[in-house]
Amino acid sequence: MSTNEEWFSRAQRVIPGGVDSPVRSFRSVGGIPYTVVSGSGAYVTDVEGTTYVDYVQSYGASLLGHAHPAVVERLREAVTRGTTFGAPTPGEVLLAEIMTSRVPGLEQVRLVSSGTEAVMSAVRVARGTTGRDKVLKFDGCYHGHSDALLVAGGSGVAQLGLPGSAGVTAHAVADTIVAPYNVVPQLDDTVAAVLVEPVAANMNMVAPRADFLHQLRDECDRVGALLIFDEVITGFRLDYAGAEQFFGVTPDLYCFGKVIGGGLPVGAFGGSLEVLSVLAPAGPVYQAGTLSGNPLATAAGAEVLSRVTPTDYADLSARVARFATQLSEAVRSSGLFARVPVRGPLLGLYLSREEFDEPENFVQAQTLCENGLYGPFFHAMLDQGIALAPGAYEILFVSLAHSDDDLARTVDAAAAAARVALRAHFAS
């Protein structure tokens, strides 16, 4: 078995759609997905032996790049002591200490096994704390696939053209309010929490307006609702202490994932001692997980977080800012218009045949993501050995392992890919 097509065909016989997460299917860009067998630093290699400069990086989980030697060694040591116990371990304490030492408003965290689980649990805590039912989320923001929060989600939900999901009942979303991103809603005393991506990174990238998060904090305080930051993507990737440090806004609850597991499945939610006092076994809000605080995930996560410094984040952000400018110029030099919005080391990519402003909400982002240019651009990049996410609603992740040569190669490829996308547009 040696080709991507053969492996995908084999997968389709035993895995629904041939994938374990819908965006991987290439449905929104067409073609056969490549099947990865290994990764190293900024690169991944598929079953056919083709190596790509990888800007997926497990959708942001790999801050140091793939298979960082120190992380691999830490995991090698950890696995010899056992993979799971269903009991307290030193590793979960050490990771929680690192996280709480960095983020000023984060006094305690509870570890779980995914970002979906983290957000679901934080919402339960908010309802248990306030005694209220309603939760407000923003159009185009993705908070995992729990029933109540899948409505009006971005990411793979948008890429598949779904308004939510079959199997989610009207009752399940009856207490979920959806508002446009970057517009501060007027709340009332039925709202338990407002859930927000500090940087919306699941509808391509939409950055918050200058005062949006501050005003959201004020509106929550006005009615006694809790503010929840979904930092599954931004947590310890946007900045050394995440969105709180970057924007100067302190939420009541935080949700984490990706980076804090060092590439292994993980999630966490946290907040102040007061807010988390409602959690069982001390309080009435129940939450549990057999694999929570997994010793391999906590070992890898602690290794990653212990290795990155504020200077690393500043340097990466500066490199990404230069890369974004060069990427935009390369696309434009080939006859397309591009916007490459940047916040810290996070960057998006929008393409258009006409000049346009940076999107501020899901409706504006959706218009650009659905204009048909991304698919041919994606495949032209892939043909040149550059792997972007297989969907226009995702962002690019530059790791600390990406070299200046990798970025320069990507810029050159983008100029050629833009010409291909332009030709495809006129041919359609």
Image (spheres, helix red, strand yellow):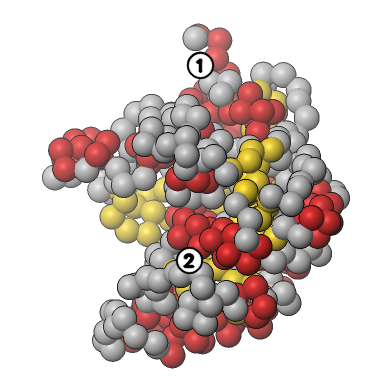
Whether residue 243 appears in this view of the structure is no
Nearer to the camera, 383 or 216: 216
Q: Residue 365 at what x, y percent from top left? A: 65, 31
Tell me the quarter of the image containing the N terminus. top left
Instruction: Depth check: give the residue in front, 119 or 396.
Output: 119
Q: Which mark is residue 267?
A: 2
Residue 397 in sight: yes
Report crowding for label 2: few under 14, some 14 to 19, many 20 or more residues within 10 A (C-alpha): many
Q: In percent of the image, x 80 and y 43: which residue is there?
A: 186
| Residue plotted at (25% across, 45% down) | 48
The count of marks equals: 2
In the depicted structure, whether residue 141 falls above or below residue 255:
above
Choose top left, top right, bottom left or bottom right for residue 87.
bottom left
Q: Amino acid at mark 1?
A: Ala
Secondary structure beneath label 1: helix
- Asked whether 402 or 241 is in front, the reply is 241
Q: What residue is shown at x 63% (from left), y 56% (from top)?
A: 132
Which mark identifies residue 155? none
Horizontal arrangement in the rendering, residue 232 relative to residue 111 (left or right): right
Q: Is residue 302 above or below residue 366?
A: below
- The residue that label 1 is drawn on is 424
Label 1: few (<14), some or many (≥20) within 10 Å? some
The amino acid marked with disc number 2 is Gly
First in residue order: circle 1 vs circle 2: 2
Distance of label 1 from label 2 (alpha carbons): 41 Å
Side of 170 relative to 355 (left or right): left
Horizontal and vertical percent position of residue 352: 66, 23
Q: Nearer the viewer, residue 407 or 36?
A: 36
| Residue 279 horizontal/vertical position (percent) | 53, 74
Residue 50 located left or right of residue 137: left
Determine the image quadrant of residue 255. Answer: bottom right
Given contact means CB atoms under 8 Å apart, are the residues at marks 1 and 2 in contact? no
